[in-house]
Amino acid sequence: MAMSENKQKMLRGELYHAFTDELVAERSRTKHAYTRYNNASDITRRELTVLWRDVTQDKTPLPPPASTTAEDDKLFENDPWIEPPVRMDYGYNVILGDNVFVNWNSIFANTCPVTIGSRTLCGPNCSFYSGYHPLDPVVRNGTQGPELGKPITIGEDCWLGGGVTILPGVTIGRGCTIAGNPARVLRKIETSMDPTQKEVEGSKDQVQGAEKPMAEMAEKAAAV
């Protein structure tokens, strides 16, 4: 079935109406899918992956089953790991890279896509809000009015601490650590991933890509 102009506007971040039959049905489908995921227990990694891909409507074929459960689990070790419960509006608007971990109580108010790069870790109670409403109350007009959004893009190798809220249109570069609410820039992390930094052998300012304060904490802990 062809995509409606209203849905196309939503995905482009333009003013659209959320309470059309089409979008109400899509949110309902997603809710049933993530409810099944949230309520799953004592199942294999393959079964969990099937449930998650149903949430996100990922049609990627699964590999053939391995001979043992342990070997079969390894087939999915690069798939994202999402601790339930999770909630979202539109499953197809959540795009997670390899080895992403999202802890419990995550919320995706995802009018526009929320993309999280590979190896990024998200603490509990993180919220991703890619949708928002017009500021003019006359235009906003409750459920009868339009809304809009902007994509959220989080790079690879990031760490979002517990309780972080990401707002519409935010882009977070590779390797960032985000904490606090509201978050603010505290310092630049010294890492071997940064091509502008040169690692000096024997330097105490850098320990396998970790920032100096973490190295100092490790030294203090070892001395106790």
Image (tube, grey):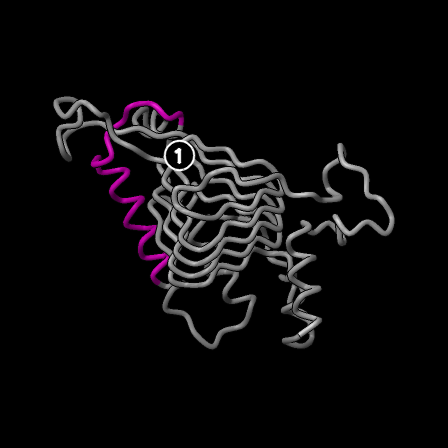
**Tag 1 secondary structure:** loop
If the image is split into quadrants, where does the N terminus sit? top left
Give the vertical position of 35 relative to 21 (above or below). Answer: below
Q: At which x and y percent is residue 191?
A: 71, 44
The image quarter in which residue 94 lies: top left
Give the vertical position of 45 relative to 156 (above or below). Answer: below
Return the residue nearer the eye: 89 or 199. 199
Q: How many marks can you see?
A: 1
Q: Does the magenta stretch include residue 161?
A: no
Give the vertical position of 124 relative to 108 (above or below). Answer: below
Q: Residue at left 53%, top 47%?
A: 96
Amino acid type at circle 1 is Cys
Name the chief secondary structure element in magenta. Answer: helix
Q: Residue at left 35%, top 53%?
A: 87
Instruction: Please provide the residue range marked out in magenta.
Output: 12-35
Q: At which x and y percent is residue 114?
A: 45, 40
Q: Residue at left 49%, top 74%?
A: 43
In the image, taking residue 48 as reference, residue 139 lies left or right, namely: left
Q: At which x and y percent is residue 26?
A: 31, 44
How crowded pointer 1 is (Cα within 10 Å; few <14, some 14-19, many 20+) is rated as: many
For the view shown, which residue lies furthest in the right direction?
201
Query: Would you name the residue on which mark 1 appears?
Result: 112
The image quarter in which residue 89 lies: top left
Return the residue nearer the eye: 221 or 161. 221
Q: Is residue 14 magenta?
A: yes
If the image is split into quadrants, where does the C terminus sit? bottom right
Give the vertical position of 202 relative to 197 (above or below). Answer: below
Q: At which x and y percent is residue 133?
A: 25, 30
